Image (tube, helix red, strand yellow):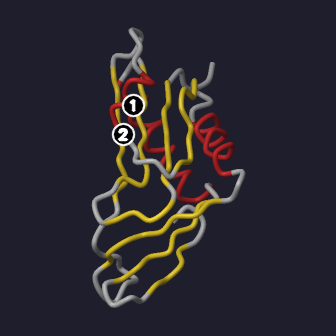
Amino acid sequence: MGAEVRLARISAATLVLQEHLDAVDDATAGAVTTFVGRVRDHDPDAAGAVVALEYTAHPDAEQTLRTIAERVGADSEALVAVSHRLGRLEVGDAAVVIAVAASHRAEAFEVCRAVIEAIKTDLPVWKRQIEADGTTAWKGLGG
């Protein structure tokens, strides 16, 4: 038993939800959940409007992403596809895309949420937040 990670990628390319849905498409799956983390125009720590984020990652980040998905899905039969984007992202751009398929909805929701929560704490990705006035601030591990 354990999740099957069908896609785990760190990339500068635009993230496409349909690619993740296709990766977890399976006749055994009665439920598919998705999560899309997007760049927003504000942050509680920002004095002004946020206009962009610049993501950078440790060279081992892609393997770490796969390990995260395997670890959080270890007690499930879920199918997982997850990607994190690097580079400069504008407001509205997808920074993280996750699709999880499972036999039942509870399992799909649980694994999807566990993947994003682990990304936020364990993935060696950093972001530089850029405000409208040019002010920048670095955010730590996982962002």
Where's the N terminus, which quadrant? top right
Name of the residue lying farthest toward the top: 27
The x and y percentages for residue 90 are 34, 65
Instruction: Kindly identify the amino acid type of the residue bearing the numbered disc 2.
Output: Val
Q: Which mark is residue 16?
A: 2
The x and y percentages for residue 64 are 67, 46
Mark 1, secondary structure of its residue: helix
Q: Which mark is residue 142?
A: none
Q: Are the residues tagged 1 and 2 within 8 Å (C-beta)?
A: yes
Name of the residue lying farthest toward the front: 13
- Asked if 124 appears above or below 2 in the picture, the reply is below
Instruction: Kindly identify the amino acid type of the residue bearing the numbered disc 1.
Output: Glu
Mark 2, secondary structure of its residue: loop
What is the spatial separation of the Cα atoms under label 1 and label 2, in whole angstroms? 6 Å
The x and y percentages for residue 88 are 44, 65
Q: Residue at x 44, y 23 (%)?
A: 24
Q: How many marks?
A: 2
Q: Which residue is mark 1?
A: 19
Asked if residue 111 lies left or right of residue 32, the reply is right
- Asked if 2 appears above or below 34 in the picture, the reply is above
Q: Quadrant of residue 66?
A: top right
Asked if residue 70 lies left or right of residue 49, the reply is right
